[in-house]
Image (spheres, rainbow, N blue to C red):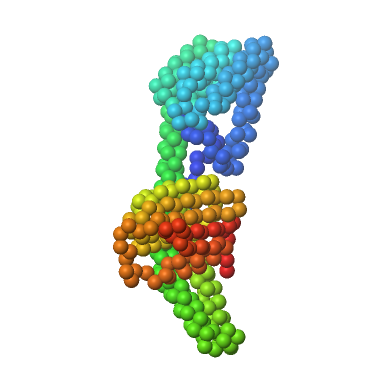
Amino acid sequence: MTATTTGHREPPPRPAFQTAGVPRSEAGSRLAGLGQALRPLLWLSVIAGTVWPLTPGAIAGGAVVLVGALCAVAAARDPRIATEQAPGDAWRTLLLVLCALSGLVATSLSPAGAGYATVFIAAGLAGRVVLDGRLVWTLAVVAAVALSAVFALSVGSPWGLLLGLSIPVLASQSLNRARLHREHARVVALLAERDALREAEIAGAAAQERARIARDLHDVLAHSLSGLSLHLQAIRAVLAKRLGPDDAVVASVDTAADLARSGLAEAKEAVAALRSTPAPTTPDLQALVDRHDAGLTVDGDLDGTAPEVREAVFAAVREALTNAGRHAPGARTGVTVTAGPDTVEATVTNTAPIGTPAVGVGGGNGLVGLRERAALVGGTVEAGPHDDGWRVVLRVPVSGRLMA
């Protein structure tokens, strides 16, 4: 059973914190936007907690924390983070080292302040912006030892060791969150690729079904209506000779013929709308000519014309080449297509036959059908003797609009 592609899909990663190796996503949430807005307030709180109570050492510590904040912001906003490989790990690690160092300096200048929070911010940010886990762990361990030493020397309390031990824990959580974020982004990309492939399969199946319906319509309706139109034309010719062209019966036959032609036009429009295959191009025409051992000359941009025009040209050339093969075996056949600004002209010329023409093959319906096809796109077909051979000329306006 084929699942639909419009069901529940995994949401893209929220850009609350940009993670190294994860492409930047435009989608977000209200919580993510709130986190973006609160970052400056976090740094202002740390700086304010460091400079209070406005002693010279505390003010100097606040200035150092401000430098660390700038380093952390520069590391987090590195544009290379959003690339797959996220180069620049060493540069971002250096910025976070400076950030952590500023926290240590601020703590030594103002032990009662909040400068130590800068070290925790650097450790928490390292796992998100640095891909190499070894660099993250090195930064976390060194920062933990240094913060424990600074607290032990500045405050004189062994409880600073517990504070330092929490830094590797924070770095570990940051690394795990970053791995989950990258895995989530990878799964989302795989799901998107799977959905695209499934949609392409569904579109291909629908195109094949449309092509089958188009073939059935063409075989059943177009051929039947074409034969009906031909028979009505023959009946009209006989009745007009016996009863006169103004007789009511002849008028009824004319009406029936018009209805048949209208139905044929509508059937061809339906077939053209259902066909999933593109209109023939110059290479397709060249392949057709090559199969009949003929020559092809194309003047102008045939591929730039409307699909209906190219289909009419392809059908005319195919019919003319088939007729040449039947009635003029061994003759030299040439095809010339001229795509002008207003009209496309296709000419198929063959010389006198060398072999014996086939007897009893074809009843002239090919040219009749060709004229009807040309009339659908506003074109005309001329066929007749030329020099010692035969020539078929198709002229189609460039617009090539299907006629109702």
Q: Is residue 252 depicted above or below 73 in this figure?
A: below
| Front position in the image: 192 or 238 | 238
Q: Is residue 55 left or right of residue 335?
A: right
Q: Residue furthest right?
A: 54
Q: Position of residue 197 (x, y in %)?
A: 41, 49
Residue at (66% x, 14% y) in the render: 59
Residue 155 visible here: no
Find the residue positioned furthest to the left: 356
Residue drawn where x is 54% and y is 12% of the image? 154
Vertical placement of residue 10 versus 128, above or below: below
| Near-viewer residue (141 or 17) | 17
Say which quadrant the N terminus sits in: bottom left
Q: In the image, what residue occupies the spot 39% across and 72% down?
A: 363
Q: Is residue 80 left or right of residue 354?
A: right
Q: Quadrant of the C terminus?
A: bottom right
Q: Position of residue 104 (x, y in %)?
A: 54, 15
Q: Quadrant of residue 102?
A: top right
Q: How many marks?
A: 0
Residue at (49%, 84%) from the top-left corner?
238
Q: Position of residue 165 (x, y in %)?
A: 44, 22
Q: Is residue 337 visible?
A: yes
